[in-house]
Amino acid sequence: MTAAPPPADPSAALGGVPLTQRRWVVATTTIAVVMASLDTAIANTALPTIARDLLTDAANAVWIVNVYQLAMVATLLPFASLGESIGHERVYLGGLILFTVASLACALAWSLPSLMAARMLQGVGASGIMSVNAAIVRHVYPKNLLGQGIGRTALAVGVAFALGPTVASAVLSVAHWPWLFAINVPCGVVAIAIALRTMPKTPRAEHRFDLVGGTLVAGAFALLILAIGEGAHWAHPLTVALELAAAAVLAFILIRRQAGHPAPMLPLDLFRRPMFALSAATSVCSFATQGLAFVALPFYFQEVLGRSAVDTGLLMTPWSIVVAVMAPVAGRLSDRYPVGLLGGIGLITLGLGMALLATLPADPSVADIVWRMGICGAGFGFFQSPNIRAIMSSAPPGRSGSASGMVATSRLMGQTIGAALVALCFALAGHSGSILALGLGAGFALVGSGASLLRLKAGRAA
């Protein structure tokens, strides 16, 4: 492998790095992002198999997914802040190494507690990767090509998340469930080798990392996600209320502690920028729509339409294929046209696709489903790249880490809210819950499109 040496001056990364080096950096970050995103999705498909093998029930097996998500959401903003202090490349490499080692531990797990512990570490590693990924992209691409670079990253995340169930089904058809995690190991080793040779140094902030603040952020977000999940599953109202209250108290203490800090870990300074705040809100709405779709549709295809698990994976594929086509196109367009307009068009299209899925005929053909899924994929792909570009470019270069952390946090928050609302829809509507969830997803997409179009005014005022 031949690659250009990393730039000696970290500030050189702000204007991009040489093309050859950039390609290698994009290669390592793409491998890492695909692994982290796939592992968010594939475990859902394998849960019944893992539960049977480890002699546990479904309620306990769900924690194999939950502990990964909790670990990711809780540590994203602390890692993003740490990246600003010690360098985004160090946080990325540390997260990649931990994720690879934890994947091996998952493959070797012999019991539910051992698998949950390994999954928690894997989630922390994935957080290290995802928290600084967008910041690294911002530093290796020149400003006029930033949309293109973000489009490629968005393509990797979107396709990996969408193809998760299909990949899991394919692996389980020929191998035992530990291979779902073991396949990460060689991929991780390759990504680490590339990163060690080519990853550029990024600028360091003058402030030191606030360890106590990081602990407060992690606790607040973990409790918030826990409360959302338990509320959707009809946990005792007092339990949910106590978790929400505890999250609010920790957030209040954090805000008081970091008042006047030049780079607060919970980036309230960035939320004072209308473009940043609207872009983050748009992201939560869009990923809530995606979460509603990707949790509800498998139940609809299998329980309502009577399709097999393999058929379900294939029916989900058009969404990811069209995202793969649209994300790079939208990324390039975002370098030339207002992101508020592009995002608004994308989310209106996504909302239309969700509404069309919610109104499928009683006995739809494959074609009826495929073209509707294609519309959803087109809308989501057209929105995602411009929105990430808006979040990153609306933050000062020195706050790239916090902006990158919010890219990942808003995505996971939206997906978590969407998944939780699906459970609520099933509790309220029984077998019709999947239809209700799809309709609700259309509503989220339309709210997101409104927030996106408001950015046109914010952009003119900036």
Image: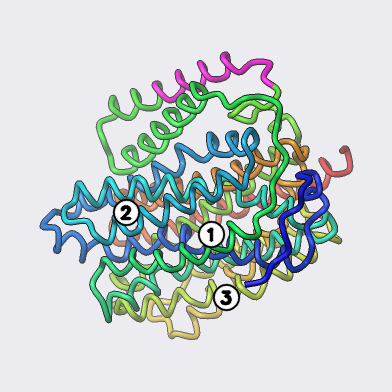
Three-letter amino acid code of the residue under disc 1: Val
Q: Which residues are magenta?
A: 246-261
- Tell me the distance, in whole angstroms, between the alpha carbons under discs 3 and 1: 24 Å
Q: Which residue is mark 2?
A: 426
Three-letter amino acid code of the residue under disc 3: Gly
**Which label sits on residue 374?**
3
Camera-side residue of 356 and 20: 20
Callout 2 crowding tier (Cα within 10 Å): few <14, some 14–19, many ≥20: some
Residue 259 within the magenta-colored segment of the rendering: yes
Camera-side residue of 67 and 24: 24
**Mark 1 or mark 2, which has the lower sequence index?**
1
Q: Is residue 344 visible?
A: no
Q: Judge whether 32 appears above or below 461 on screen.
A: below
- Tell me the distance, in whole angstroms, between the alpha carbons under discs 1 and 2: 32 Å
Look at the numbered disc 3 and give the secondary structure of its residue.
helix
**Which label sits on residue 349?**
none
Three-letter amino acid code of the residue under disc 2: Phe
On the picture, is 277 further left or further right than 459?
Answer: left
Residue 344 point in image, percent of width and height: 72, 56
Closer to the observer: label 3 or label 1? 1
Look at the numbered disc 2 and give the secondary structure of its residue.
helix
